[in-house]
Image (cartoon, helix red, strand yellow):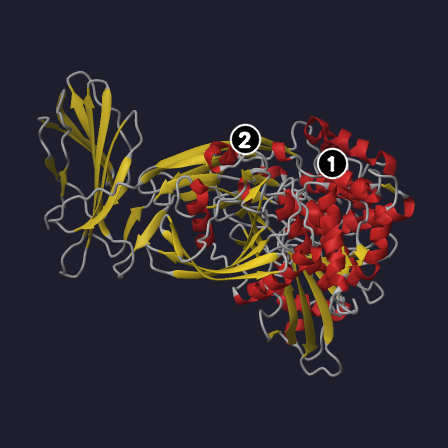
Amino acid sequence: MTPPSIHLTWTPPTPLGATTGYRISFTGGGNSGSVDVSGGSTDNYTLTGLMRGEMYNISIVGISEHFFSQSVAWDTVKLPGGEEREVMNEKEQEGGKSNSRQGGNAGSIAAGVLVPLILVAVIATLVVVTLIWLKRRQSNGLKNPLSVIHQTFSAATSPSVNNVTMDHSTKLYKRPNDKIPAIVQFPKDTHVQEGEAVLFQVKVTGVPHPNLTWYHNGVQVKADYSRDLAGDGSLTLPSTELKHSGVYRLVAHNSVGRVEQEVRLTVGGEGQITPSSNKPTSVPTAPIPVSQLGNHVENKHKRRNQGFNEEYQSLYDGRDKTISIATNSENKLKNRFGNICVYDDHRVQLTPLPGHPDCQTDYINACYVDGYSTPSKFLATQGPLPKTLVDFWRLVWQERPPSIVMITKLEEGGKIKCQRYWPQTGRCNFGPFEVTLTDEQIFADYTTRRLEAQLEGGSGHPLKVAQFHFTAWPDHGVPDYATPLLAFHRRVIKEHNPRKRPLMVHCSAGVGRTGAFITIDHVLEQLGREKMVDIPCIINKIRHQRMKMVQTVDQYVFIHDAILERVVCGDTQIEASNLRMAIIKLKEGIPGESSYHQQFSILEKVSPNPKEVKSVAGRSNPKKNRNMEFLPVDKIRVVLKGETPDYINATFVHGYKQQRAFIIAQSPMESTARDFWKMVWDRKCGVMVMLCHLEEAGREVCYQYWPSSGSKAFGEFTVELLGEQKLTGFITRNLTVINNKSKEVQQLCQFHITNWAPDGSCSRIKTVIDVILEVTKVQIRTSNKPIVIHCSDTVSRSGMFCAILTTIERCKTEGVVDVFQVVKALRVQKPGAVLTVGQYMTVFEAVLVFLDSFDTYSNFGPKQ
């Protein structure tokens, strides 16, 4: 049999310059060698004398009169000769080489000869590299397809790679949109203490989308109990350990090229205390009087939260506790994270269920946690895994909590955080338990569900459970503001009956967000009873019952900020039936110092300053703004799809039951009318509310963006007036929007409130309520797409309208009115909304007008 050979071809550099020949080097088969080929214009050579079935590394290096170009190491090749063939996928992976076994099945990676043909030519002092990789596949006598990667780059520039599939006669085709990976966001070196969470958040671009791989001290990072890999490449360590210290390297590669970047993580430091050390289990703390809480929190925030960091490190760490039961071979796989389990002396033991073979074990990652004044008030647990779903329902059935608080999404950052333990509709079974979803209500920040559970073969009434699912906690870190979580806590505590067994709380691991929720509940009760708070003492107490409660410094800081917010803002919630009397009391006092004015003054202090918001897009497009006040916040602004620039002066705002329920927009100018209709078209809006005249105080505040009759074109959009009806204080217009490019049509209803007084107030509040009732009806028919709202300045009347509608929606569901909290939440999204104390008072008055339109308020409130 003739020894195998490989015929190599390459493209000589243009111009040839000083290249006098090429050196072909090879290693493999137990030997190595090189061949010098003369002639700068030579473009092929047959390498002979090779051995079958052996791996070879082959490179071609250009030679000049004075020196060789730098050698480059590339993929290893295995020649035909065995039943099984292997091709190295990567050049050298950190921590070892990675081989992929390949067969001849259709759809698999092509097997056979992968030949890297490498040309490095030296032209003066510039190194130019041209690569052609040939990969031939054996196809049982059929036409042999050829996969070609053609790559040219210089030492001073990044490579450009073009991937095509071709046969022998096909010419190379360049794909111009390919881009080498680029790491545009990467963390800095980080120093944390053991037990703290770390997020290495990254952003990588490239075409095709790069593959992302993390390495820790040269070993590839795999997702496990202590490390979480997100879909965007971000790496999370929920609870750091000493072994996590070291260098983390992110490698991003696609068919165009490869980039990498490193970050160092230090856990602990010099003198780091080990588990066997004599570190005190906790440091005594002193309660803080409520009058001193503001100064206390402010001081702890100084020097980048140094005070909080030091205090957090002194918390009880549970090292004197044993966890042998939770970590034995039978139980350790039932813990979502290997380092987060339950103490031997403080765990809930499941009772075996006779007749059910899958319900005989006694371990679950759950334990009771005391409340401030109620022992075992909470049942803290982890979000169930697929293998613990039955045990989860055994726990619920056994301990019979009337309410479950869930503080995680099912999936975050591309990772499963909790297995769904309820049916999406109807009913489903979890082992011997049949669970039925009887009701579900979705709100902007949380969802409530009513569940019923019945044991197979059981008798009697089913177990009824109310689930409160908080959905506004971000995937990484903590919420920017505590307002949604505090409102959620109020809702839970109002409906939960502590005399009917415990309040079950879980997140993913059952210690971080769960610990924050339980701590906040503790502190609020302590605050009400003692007029002082001792957050470290409370966390130390609950950490004796469940490990790592309040898992990160960020959560620890968030708890303090949340409690301070409650102290500063007070309890502003009013029962709907008491609203009239409450309004009378709010008006009491000398002019300018009423309770209305006091509340509004606090609101001004705790709200974001409109002049300090991050609005890069708004400031970069001054011609698209009527003025530079009240610009949209970058992260929640409305984007014009497919446009460059994509800016329009408009902001998404949450309602009570729906995220992005509203779009608060600037009233169009002539130059932005087309953009306005593009926004309406993009978001499929079916309702629009106009809260201004076209001119006010002798100046234009809104360009007429609809036709007075017939139709009118705005760029690629034609708007047709189908009908107009004038009612008391407002006009309704039915409009059709035609996209002249796609020929598609959208229907829209505009509500134009016209009875504005010269000072900007509404001369008849009932008009606003009438419009809200009409808007609600139309919204039901238009699939609840965002309502577009615009006025003269984007904050005064638009903010007032959103606040009234949101307050009414909450009142109808919960039977309470809390204008302060509604406006506070609104101002987080649209800083400056509800601009004056007069507008703030109008919100109260409007809600009262709404309630007065009913004979009784008994229809309002939560379902029982």
219 or 18: nearer the viewer: 18
Question: Residue 436, percent across and down?
Answer: 64, 74
First in sequence, mark 2 or 1: give its number: 2
Q: Residues within 10 Å of mark 1 (few under 14, many from 20)?
A: few
Task: Answer above or below: position of 859 versus 192.
Answer: below
Question: Residue 286, percent across and down?
Answer: 87, 36
| Distance Cα–Cα, label 2 vs label 1 | 33 Å
Q: Quadrant of the C terminus?
A: bottom right
Q: Which residue is mark 1?
A: 605
Secondary structure found at label 1: helix
Q: Amino acid at mark 1?
A: Lys
Q: Residue at x 19, y 21 (%)?
A: 123
Task: Answer above or below: position of 762 versus 355.
Answer: above
Question: Residue 251, percent across and down?
Answer: 42, 38
Q: Which residue is mark 2?
A: 188
Q: Amino acid at mark 2?
A: Lys
Q: Quadrant of residue 139?
A: bottom left
Q: Residue at x 79, y 58 (%)?
A: 493
Q: Nearer the viewer, mark 2 or mark 1?
A: 1
Task: Answer above or below: position of 780 versus 511.
Answer: below
Q: Residue at x 61, y 44 (%)?
A: 829
Secondary structure found at label 2: loop
